[in-house]
Amino acid sequence: MDRFVSREPGRQTRHSFSFGSSYDPDRVSFGPLIALNDDLLGPGAGYDAHEHADVVLVTWVVSGALEHEDESGCVTQSAGELAITLTGSGITHSERAGTGVTRSVQAWLRPDDPGGRPGRRTSTPDLSGGELVVVADETDLGVPGATYRIGELPAGSTLTLPPAPRRYVFVATGALTRSSLAEPLAAGDAFEVTGDHELTLTAAVPTQLLVWSFAA
């Protein structure tokens, strides 16, 4: 609930970093991660055609379906599907919910090399194993040392985060347990980890985690 919230008709977005009119010098970026936007869209609501350049957009649809339209046409990204958009020297696209309420989490990253040819790809990772799954690596993202993992954890399951100098963990759904004196980390909560020390997480209920790892 501490996140900055922007609202438009049919849309509510919670921003984990400085974004638009909201600037917090302590929340500008985490490694190459410069934005994490949690969108809740009503049917047909979203973003009209707009431009991007020199940023990598990584969109995960938590529920519903997102319609993405650019010069190549319109495609639907359903819940459980990941899209990586390399904006390169520039793209114009629109993003809107389909016929139902849609929630998506979109990360923005600084690429290693600006410019270049734009591109977009989608994938549907298999999360049935109850563990973190690598859904994108530095080759996919054009960001050296970056890895994106997503996991669907059963209630009571425990996992150890893969080591990395920087790790960013976002609870998309469900909750993680904390000490008996603290409230659980629930949907929308996140934490940053610096250093390679071991960290174990336990799901209090069925939980979906989005985990970024960065080399610097």
Image (cartoon, helix red, strand yellow):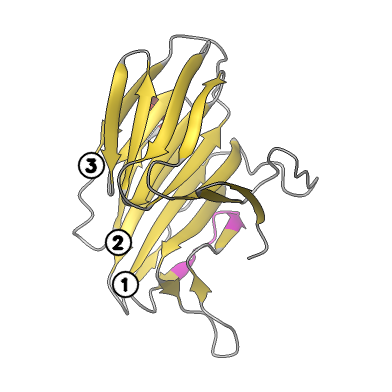
Give the Cα distance between marks 3 and 2: 13 Å
Give the Cα distance between marks 3 and 1: 20 Å
Image: magenta residue range? 192-200
Q: Secondary structure at mark 1?
A: loop
Residue sitting at x 49%, y 46%: 213
**Closer to the camera, 66 or 17?**
66
Q: Secondary structure at mark 3?
A: loop
For badge 2, the amino acid type reads Glu
Residue 73 placement (x, y as % from top left): 30, 18
**Closer to the camera, 10 or 14?**
10
Answer whether labels 3 and 2 touch (C-beta < 8 Å): no
- Residue 8 shown in magenta: no
Give the Cα distance between marks 2 and 1: 7 Å
Q: Which residue is mark 3?
A: 124
For badge 3, the amino acid type reads Thr
Can residue 144 be seen here? The reply is no
**Closer to the camera, 53 or 212?**
53
Residue sitting at x 57%, y 19%: 54
For badge 1, the amino acid type reads Pro
Residue sitting at x 77%, y 49%: 26
Residue sitting at x 27%, y 72%: 154
Answer whether labels 2 and 1 touch (C-beta < 8 Å): yes
Q: Is residue 63 left or right of residue 26?
A: left
Q: Which residue is mark 1?
A: 206
Can residue 102 be seen here? The reply is yes
Residue 52 placement (x, y as % from top left): 55, 21
| The furthest residue to the front | 9
Q: Which residue is mark 2?
A: 152
| The furthest residue to the bottom | 180
